[in-house]
């Protein structure tokens, strides 16, 4: 118990002192995860909306597949991206392996199904309400899907946050494709795993506290935005 | 001109039995019948929201959708201002100077002062007036109304009925589904009476209420329950 308290005290000290190593790791983690979320949002929201609004053969199978892909194991994604980006792989020439770029790609693949599947569900629910009115006004296809997406944008924050939560907490994929190289691809989760195995608990705990604080702050902000939007727009 | 509207042996999944009729410009038409008679489905077939499983729905002119509007029992408003909701519809229809036209439409239904209020926070009656403003702004040749006052209080109902009369006075063909006999009398010129998906009777309003030609209509007017 004593050693845990000591570790927590040291961790708080590290955060309070603005430790450079810790700051660097936090910034890289945020950069990688937020880039992945931005990419996955850009691709996932229109994909989810298109599946929700469109009626085409194989739609049900795609919905089942998308839902199943939400549970993609990070290490498998990491392995596949590793194989693609390794020198012998089809994308080896890009030289992305063991760079933050590779980590962004892996995390994007990991969270794209989450954002697409959750937004598909939200748009589907909204579409039941909007469809007749929009079609009556002459809005169909991509235009209608975009209208619904924009109209429920605050509800879609939940889908984006779920993706962010998954990306920022994920360790397996970024460890494989990033290599956990000090000062290059070392992020919060991989550092926590490494430092814990080395027995350096203060840094691991400090990063853990920062990680939880960031996720909490982002969720609180999203909740407040959603509430304010609901009050304003109904 | 997109009227007359012709339905040739139109049927829909056993909900509407094969039905042939023609609607001309002019008289306000009321689709009357009990719940489940097929009024709303028939209206959606006419408006093109549903495709008939048999038969054909045909309008006379080009681009018939542009010259129709529909107001639903529960108005669906986008999460934007009342004005922006009308502007959205006008832009889809390719109307120039959408802002000006939308403001005029809001003034017409008495919602000018609420133009910048979010549409979804308006009361039920105000939202229905906004739905009518959205339709009014499009100057439709035909206006479909699906039980537009079913969930409104008497005051809001009166306001909506006044606006429906304004559409009629402006030359718009009104086609309204209702199970409200008083409303049918007040707003209709002719009645299409539906019973279990069949068009049982078509007659002028006065005649329908004085001398209904079918047993089903007689029972409906008397408030009898035909299944007992």
Image (tube, rainbow, N blue to C red):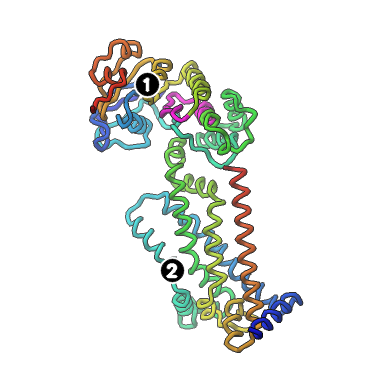
Q: Is residue B145 magenta?
A: yes
Q: Residue at x 30, y 29 (%)?
A: B37
**Is A203 on the left-hand or right-hand side of B164?**
right
Q: Quadrant of the N terminus of chain B?
A: top left
Give the chain of mark 1.
Answer: B
Residue A127 at what x, y percent from top left?
A: 44, 46
User: Which of the 4 image quadrants contains residue A203?
Assistant: bottom right
Residue B162 at what x, y percent from top left?
A: 51, 19
Q: Which residues are magenta?
A: B130-151
Q: Residue at x 46, y 27 (%)?
A: B149
Residue A209 at what x, y percent from top left?
A: 64, 73
Q: Residue at x 56, y 61 (%)?
A: A161
Residue A214 higher or lower than A2, as above or below:
above
At label 1, counting other C-alpha atoms closer than 10 Å, the crowd grade (few under 14, some 14-19, many 20 or more) is many
**Is B3 on the left-hand or right-hand side of A78?**
left
Which label sits on residue A71?
A: 2
Q: Is residue A50 magenta?
A: no
In terms of secondary structure, where does tag 1 sit?
strand
Name the residue tied to disc 1: B30
- Kindly tell me whether residue B138 is visible in this rendering: no
User: Disc 2 vs disc 1: Cβ atoms closer than 8 Å?
Assistant: no
Most foreground residue, B124 or A189: B124
Which label sits on residue B41?
A: none
Give the chain of mark 2.
Answer: A
Q: How many marks?
A: 2
């Amino acid at each position: 118990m004593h050693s845990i308290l000591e570790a927590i005290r040291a961790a708080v000290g590290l955060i309070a002192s603005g430790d450079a190593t810790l700051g660097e790791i936090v910034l890289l983690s945020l950069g990688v995860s937020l880039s992945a979320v931005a990419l996955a949002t850009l691709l996932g929201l229109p994909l989810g909306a298109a599946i929700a609004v469109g009626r085409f053969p194989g739609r049900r199978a795609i919905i089942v597949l998308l839902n199943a892909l939400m549970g993609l194991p990070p290490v498998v994604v990491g392995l596949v991206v590793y194989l693609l980006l390794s020198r012998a792989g089809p994308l080896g020439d890009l030289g992305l392996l063991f760079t933050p770029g590779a980590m962004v790609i892996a995390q994007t693949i990991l969270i794209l199904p989450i954002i697409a599947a959750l937004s598909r569900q939200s748009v589907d629910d909204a579409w039941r309400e909007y469809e007749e009115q929009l079609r009556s006004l002459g809005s169909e296809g991509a235009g209608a899907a975009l209208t619904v997406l924009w109209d429920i944008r605050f509800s879609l924050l939940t889908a984006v946050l779920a993706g962010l939560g998954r990306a920022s907490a994920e360790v397996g994929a970024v460890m494989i494709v990033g290599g956990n190289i000090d000062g290059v691809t070392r992020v919060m989760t991989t550092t926590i795993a490494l430092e814990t195995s080395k027995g350096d608990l203060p840094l691991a705990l400090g990063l853990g506290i920062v990680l939880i604080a960031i996720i909490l702050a982002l969720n609180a902000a999203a909740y407040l935005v959603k509430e304010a939007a609901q009050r304003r727009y109904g | 001109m997109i009227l007359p509207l012709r339905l040739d042996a139109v049927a829909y999944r056993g909900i509407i039995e094969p039905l042939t009729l023609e609607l001309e410009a002019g008289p306000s038409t009321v689709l009357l019948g009990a719940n489940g008679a097929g009024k709303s489905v028939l209206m959606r077939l006419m408006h093109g929201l549903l495709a008939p499983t048999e038969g054909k729905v045909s309008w006379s002119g080009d681009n018939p959708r542009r010259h129709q509007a529909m107001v639903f029992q529960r108005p669906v408003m986008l999460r934007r201002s009342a004005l922006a909701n009308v502007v959205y519809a006008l832009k889809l229809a390719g109307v120039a100077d959408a802002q000006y036209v939308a403001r005029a439409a809001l003034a017409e239904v008495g919602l000018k002062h609420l133009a910048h209020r979010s549409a979804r926070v308006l009361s039920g009656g105000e939202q229905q007036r906004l739905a009518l403003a959205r339709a009014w702004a499009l100057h439709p040749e035909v206006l479909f109304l699906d039980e537009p006052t079913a969930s409104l209080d008497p005051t809001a109902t009166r306001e909506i009925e006044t606006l429906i009369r304004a559409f009629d006075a402006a030359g718009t063909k009104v086609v309204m589904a209702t199970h409200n006999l008083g409303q049918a009398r007040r707003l209709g010129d002719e009645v299409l009476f539906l019973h279990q998906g069949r068009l049982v009777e078509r007659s002028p309003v006065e005649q329908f209420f004085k001398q209904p030609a079918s047993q089903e209509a007689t029972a409906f007017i008397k408030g009898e329950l035909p299944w007992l």
